[in-house]
Structures are given as C-alpha cells and as structure tokens.
C-alpha cells in the first residue's frame, strides 16, 4: 500500500469511528445497550453538570432535562427521584409514597450507592437497582434528556423509555 493509500485509509477509519466515550459515560451506554435500547450517549464540550447547563448545551427547555436526585431513606437506602429540571422536588411527597422518611444524600453517599458523581448521575447503570420515583411532568415532553455518567454527557430519551428503564413509580413530585 502506498503512503497516500495508507493515510486515506487511516482518515476514513478515524471518520467512521467516533471518539471513545469517557469510561463512566461508556458504562451508561453499555447499560442502555444491555436493555436493548438504541439510545446514544452524547458528550458535549460544554458542561452539562446542572439542568440549566444541560439545557443550554442541548438547546432545549430546562423542563426537558431529567434531574437524577439521590435521597437517603431512614433505613439508609438510596432512593432515586428523576424529576423535570423545571421542578423542585417535594421530599414529603416522596417520603409518603415510600412509607419512610427521606433526607438529602451527601456526595460520598451518591458515589458509593450509584457509582457516579453528582452532576452526572444517570437514571440507569447504577451499582445496584434503586427504588425510583418518576416525575409525571416529564410525560408532557416529546423528548427529554438525562445525565449519562459524567458532567459532560447526556442522552435523549422519552418519558416511556425512562419509566421502563427505571421501573419507577410515576407520581407528582413537584413542590406545590
Ligand atoms: N447533569 C445534570 C443534568 S442531566 C444533572 O445531573 N443535574 S442534577 O440536577 O440531576 O444533579 C445535580 C443535583 O445534585 C442537584 O440538583 C442537587 O440535588 C444535587 N447536588 C448538588 N450538589 C450537591 C451536594 N454537594 N451534595 C448533595 N447533593 C448535591
């Protein structure tokens, strides 16, 4: 093969294979594939750490961003609430649905329980399955976006995808 042919082949290969995802984002991508979902994790040069930053990066409404919030139950279990970025979560409503008091989780608890850092906690791919509550308002959007393991990675999905992959209880989670 000539040098020209060789460099053509290299450039074609580079063009065909997208750059690899960060390991934590790849874990989320693998979890999606393992569930038979053809959803694609996307990394952004800009931060997607907060719901507003994610909305800016994606170019959608903040309400379309899925916040993945971890709470700690009185019994020490991690509880996942996936909520619209437009809503504040009513902890009392979650506690009532759970039948147990809940409190905020600290950063270490979030990492230990999910395997991900705050700002990148995804709705799936955790170290173990988590009891999950899903914000009913997310069903009001045709598409939504959730964190995918890092503060730069998200994926697009539907509320039906989210409910299916988390096996979550759909309820009103927003503060009145
Ligand atoms: N990637 C974005 C959008 S997909 C994201 O993860 N947003 S989030 O809202 O789900 O994650 C940030 C949340 O983590 C905050 O709403 C807050 O509830 C929680 N959080 C932020 N800082 C801390 C902290 N120091 N300790 C505990 N929880 C925190």
Image (tube, grey):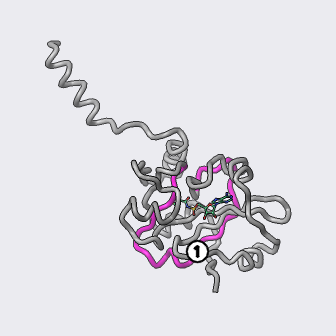
Residue at screen point 47% across, 50% down: 152
**Ligand 1 quadrant assignment:** bottom right
Reply above or below: 42 against 131.
above
SS at mark 1? strand
| Horizontal and vertical percent position of residue 102 | 78, 69
On the image, numbered disc 1 is attached to which residue? 135
Residue 121 vertical placement versus 87 (above, below) = above
Q: Is mark 1 within 8 Å of ligand 1?
A: no
In this view, the residue farthest toward the bottom is 176
Residue at 42 percent of width and 48 percent of height: 43
Task: Tell me where residue 135 appears, x and y as whole percent.
Answer: 58, 74
- Viewport quadrant of the N terminus: top left
- Closest to the observer: 85 or 127? 85
Q: Which image quarter holds the C terminus? A: bottom right
Residue 45, relative to residue 142: is it above or below? above
The residue positioned 38% from the left and 61% from the top of the image is: 58
Tell me if residue 74 comes above or below residue 140 in the rendering. Answer: above
Outermost right residue: 75
Point out the stretch of residues depicted in magenta. Answer: 124-149
Residue 59 lies, in percent from the top left, at: 36, 64
Classed neighbour count for the residue bearing mark 1: other residues with Cα under 10 Å, few (<14), some (14–19), many (≥20): many
Please state which of residues 25 and 58 is positioned toward the viewer in this rendering.
58
Residue 136 within the segment the image draws in magenta:
yes
Q: Residue at image x 20%, y 18%?
A: 6
The x and y percentages for residue 53 are 46, 61
The picture quadrant where one finds residue 100 is bottom right
60 with respect to 68 (left or right)? left
Instruction: Write down the quadrant of residue 13 in the picture.
Output: top left
Residue 29 vs residue 66, the one in the foreground: 66
> Is residue 66 a member of the stretch shown in magenta?
no
């Amino acid at each position: 093969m000539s040098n020209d042919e060789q460099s053509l082949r290299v450039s074609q290969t580079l063009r065909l294979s997208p750059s690899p995802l960060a390991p934590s984002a790849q874990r989320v991508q693998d979890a999606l594939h393992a569930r038979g979902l053809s959803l694609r994790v996307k990394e952004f040069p800009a931060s997607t750490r907060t719901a507003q930053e994610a909305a800016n990066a994606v170019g959608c409404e903040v309400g379309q961003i899925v916040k993945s919030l971890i709470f700690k139950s009185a019994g020490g279990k991690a509880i996942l609430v996936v909520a619209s970025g437009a809503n504040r979560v009513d902890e009392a409503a979650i506690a009532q649905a759970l039948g147990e008091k809940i409190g905020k989780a600290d950063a270490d608890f979030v990492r230990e329980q999910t395997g991900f850092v705050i700002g990148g906690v995804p709705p799936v791919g955790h170290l173990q399955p988590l009891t999950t509550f899903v914000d009913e308002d997310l069903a009001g959007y045709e598409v939504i976006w959730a964190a995918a393991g890092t503060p730069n990675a998200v994926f697009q999905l539907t509320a039906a995808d989210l409910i299916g992959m988390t096996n979550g209880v759909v309820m009103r989670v927003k503060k009145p």
